[in-house]
Image (cartoon, grey):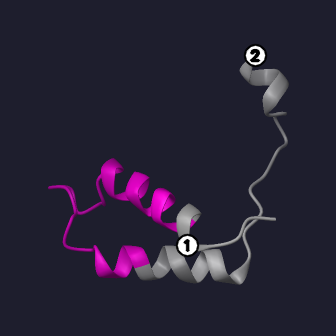
């Protein structure tokens, strides 16, 4: 299946308060893992996504 068939261009993520809280908490606790530019590294965002997916219920 092609990417365009799986994800329509107007598809959006469904965030509930628990997911938002988990993301903010993860980023807060891992803020020392920033790159030289002051932004978080892509690996930090990827680990946040993995952690949130394991710890929260998705609709």
Residue 10, compared with residue 55, is above or below; it is above
Question: Dot 2, how many residues are within 10 Å of its Cα: few (below 14), some (14-19), or many (20+)?
Answer: few
Residue 30, compared with residue 45, is above or below; it is below
Q: In this view, does 27 lie to the left or right of 17?
A: left
State the extent of the magenta-drawn residues as a range. 26-52
The verdict on residue 50 being magenta is: yes
Residue shown at 35% from the left, 49% from the top = 42
Residue shown at 58% from the left, 62% from the top = 53
Image position, residue 29 (x, y; %):
31, 81
Q: Which of marks 2 and 1 is in front?
A: 1
Q: Name the residue under label 2.
A: 2
Nearer-N-terminus badge (2/1): 2
Question: Which quadrant would the C terminus be assigned to in this image?
Answer: bottom right
Q: Mark 1 points at which residue?
A: 55
Q: Which residue is more in the foreground, 40 or 50?
A: 50
Image position, residue 23 (x, y; %):
51, 73
Query: In this view, which residue lies farthest toward the left?
Result: 36
Element marked by disc 1: helix
Residue shown at 74% from the left, 76% from the top = 16
Which of the 4 image quarters holds residue 9?
top right
Q: Is residue 37 left or right of residue 3?
A: left
């Amino acid at each position: 299946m092609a990417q365009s068939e799986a994800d329509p261009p107007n598809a959006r993520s469904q965030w509930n308060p628990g997911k938002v809280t988990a993301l903010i908490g993860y980023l807060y606790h891992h803020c020392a893992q920033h790159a030289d530019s002051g932004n978080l590294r892509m690996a930090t965002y990827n680990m946040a996504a993995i952690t949130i997916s394991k710890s929260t219920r998705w609709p």
